Amino acid sequence: MQPAASNIKPYVDQVLDLYRHTPGTLGGGRREDRRLAVELYNQGVSLDVIQEALLLATARRCLRAHDAVPLAPVRSLHYFVPVIEELIATPLPDGYAYYLKQKLRKIQAEHNQCITTKARRRKPG
């Protein structure tokens, strides 16, 4: 069963907001990202699965060896599609998303600060 069409805009906006606030991303959203969010909506992918996929992929990127070569920023929501598919097939164990959030708390706070700073710079004042 396909979700009601009236729910598509809030869903897409929330997906893009989750993506924008994911550490390691450029903090923006492109037209292709919006199209992908619509596709995910049409496939019935829950926001919880998307949020967990962003979290898991971020943990995999950020919680690597300290001497590892730094990774380039994620430039598209499409980067997360394989992890979304992985979690549809095999959901995270209970409590694991919370554990990852705690591990990434400092990284998330730094990313949120960067987004806030960028937003302030864009406002005419």
Image: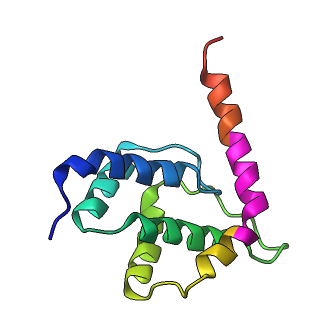
Please state the horizontal and vertical placement of residue 57, each as a whole percent of the image. Answer: 57, 71
The picture quadrant where one finds residue 89 is bottom left
Residue 7 visible in rendering: yes
| In this picture, residue 18 sits left or right of residue 37 | right
Please state the horizontal and vertical placement of residue 65, each as a whole percent of the image. Answer: 80, 77
112 falls in the magenta region: yes
Residue placed farthest to the top in the image?
A: 125
Q: Residue at x 76, y 69 (%)?
A: 69
26 falls in the magenta region: no
Q: 110 above or below 91?
A: above
Residue 62 visible in rendering: no
| In this picture, residue 80 sits left or right of residue 39 | right
Q: Residue 30 versus residue 23: which sits nearer the camera?
A: 23
Q: Where the C terminus falls, by quadrant? A: top right
Q: Which residues are drawn in magenta?
A: 102-114
Please state the horizontal and vertical placement of residue 122, each as a whole percent of the image. Answer: 61, 23
Q: Residue at x 61, y 82 (%)?
A: 95
Q: 35 above or below 50?
A: above
| In this picture, residue 113 sits left or right of residue 27 | right
| In this picture, residue 62 sits left or right of residue 11 | right
Please state the horizontal and vertical placement of residue 119, each as a whole percent of the image. Answer: 62, 30
Q: Residue at x 61, y 19 (%)?
A: 123
Q: Residue at x 18, y 56 (%)?
A: 4
Q: Disc count in the image?
A: 0
Q: Where the N terminus falls, by quadrant? A: bottom left
Q: Residue 10 versus residue 63: which sits nearer the camera?
A: 10
Q: Residue 66 versus residue 43: which sits nearer the camera?
A: 43
What kind of secondary structure does the magenta stretch mostly adopt?
helix
Residue placed farthest to the right in the image?
A: 67
Q: 99 above or below 117?
A: below
Q: Residue 48 versus residue 110: which sits nearer the camera?
A: 48
